[in-house]
Image (cartoon, rainbow, N blue to C red):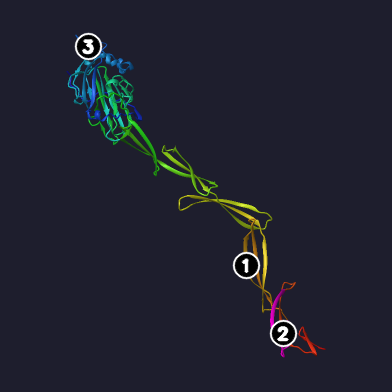
Amino acid sequence: MIILNFSFIGNVSAEGTENLGTIGGCLPSLDAISKKTVGFNVKFYNYHWLSYNDATNRGSPDLTTYATPAYYNGGYLEQGQFGETNGAISFDYTFNLPSSQSLQAVKGQLPSGYNYDQPVYLTNWTFVATGYFLPTISGSYKFTIGYVDDLAIVSIGGGTAYDCCMASDSSEYLKSYQINSIWSSSGPTGVNNLVIDLVAGVYYPIRLFHTNRQWAGGLTFGYTDPNGNYTNYWNNTVYTLPDAEEVCNATTVTTTVPWGQSYTTTKTTVQPITISSTTKEVINVIVETPQVVSTTTKKWTGSFTSTYATSLFTTTRSDGVSITSTVIYVETPNDESTTYTPWTGAFTSTIGTSVTTSIGSDGIPTTSTIYTVETPTSNDVSTTYTPWTGAFTSTIGTSVTTSIGSDGIPTTSTIYTVETPEVDAASTTYTPWTGAFTSTIGTSVTTSIGSDGIPTTSTIYTVETPTSNDYWIRRYSNHIYDLHS
């Protein structure tokens, strides 16, 4: 029996990376979870020589079958299973032999991480390891085949490694894979790094297939968590669970909500929900996207403001960030006003239109339309004259007023206040009476405007005089005429 040498001499590292994003996960029943055990389940299979002479302890190795889809898709089962174990938590090993033993079948002891204490023909063997990877934190995980001799195939995810909660029935035959790394004499080939976004609390089926066809062999398999920590021990993240009667694919509920930041963030948790009296866990994904709110306003004949439609759509910026836009369609009462400006033209002309929107204390916008109209000047001029004691005419005041007619057109009125020299024309009217003395019984003042526009003030005195049978007196224009009876 050969004891393994862990010096990693002569092994070839694999190369290449694949980034998958998200994959399918499983949410087993609480009963199944309560029965989980730590580590992988591993089944060991023979990998036969093309021929082998027991007498000489030499054989002819099969250098091709192991790399064919027919073999790793189920053909390996035909070569026979020789062992099985549970609780495997690490698969790193290296097996080195001198070239003199390159055509010999040699047994060795697996490292303790396999949890298998029986000697194994490590020169030619195959194993299939299955389990559920349970992330402790959500984020991006990188699974790595560090080096391989001769073949390693890794499958992760429900329906990819095997069906959720159906490992026994669906893990023997390869469904699909993300890592297929193989040794060649000219160097490594295939993909050895796999990057996946995983959710804490979700169980992800994982399957590792490995074959060493002849002579030296080796393998390292580990992962890097979202914090950048690498480990090749799986005792804190991989479990074996009993099968169920049906698949237990995790249901993902995604909700997109707007928020006030300029970037998009995703929060993913596992939460229980109840559907038709049945409680099950789901993957709850909350996507917060930047929000843009705009309002489109149109006028209408109503007397109140009405929101008649709302639309929501998502666009993607050039940097890949999703933007949630909300458009609110609002009808507002029509508020119009007209400003008239007099001008010297003979016609009315609209020279400008402006629209303004103001937000009221109730948060509702009001749209105002202002029309600016030039109208012909209609100037109504009037003059008020005031007599005074001076010898000349003087304009002592001017006022301008504007009024809007029933046709909506403004009229401008100009009022001049003018002081003019007072011209006093006095006259006396005599009235006979039976008294013995003369008496002024009345005085009146009148003003008239002459053709020159200047006012004249007239004063009329009414006088009672004694009656005489011999004479009557007439006084006119300040002259007295005596008439004999």
3 or 1: mark nearer the eye: 1
Q: State the separation of the CA atoms marked 3 and 1.
A: 130 Å
Q: Which residue is drawn at 33% across and 21% down?
A: 175
- The quadrant the C terminus occupies is bottom right
Confirm or deny contact between disc 1 and disc 2 (CB under 8 A).
Answer: no
Q: State the separation of the CA atoms marked 1 and 2.
A: 44 Å
Closer-to-camera residue (272/145)? 272
Taking the image as drawn, is residue 398 in sight? Answer: yes
Q: How crowded is mark 3: few (under 14 residues within 10 Å), some or many (20 or more)?
A: some
Q: State the image quarter where residue 37 is shown.
A: top left
SS state under label 3: strand
Q: What residue type is labelled 3?
A: Arg
In the rendered image, the residue lying farthest to the right is 485
Range covered by the magenta-colored residues: 427-448
Secondary structure that dominates the magenta span: strand
3 or 2: mark nearer the eye: 2
User: Which residue lies under the disc numbered 3?
Assistant: 58
Is residue 301 shown left or right of residue 478? left
Confirm or deny contact between disc 3 and disc 2 (CB under 8 A).
Answer: no
Q: How crowded is mark 2: few (under 14 residues within 10 Å), some or many (20 or more)?
A: some
Q: What residue type is labelled 2?
A: Val
Q: Which amino acid does label 1 sit on?
A: Ser
Residue 133 is tagged as: none
Closer-to-camera residue (283/91)? 283
User: Which residue lies under the disc numbered 2?
Assistant: 463
SS state under label 1: strand
Q: Earlier in the sequence, mark 3 or mark 1?
A: 3
Seen in the picture, residue 12 relative to 394 is either above or below; the reply is above
Q: Position of residue 324 (x, y in %)?
A: 43, 40
User: Which residue lies under the disc numbered 1?
Assistant: 399
Q: Position of residue 206 (x, y in %)?
A: 29, 26
Is residue 290 shown left or right of residue 149? right
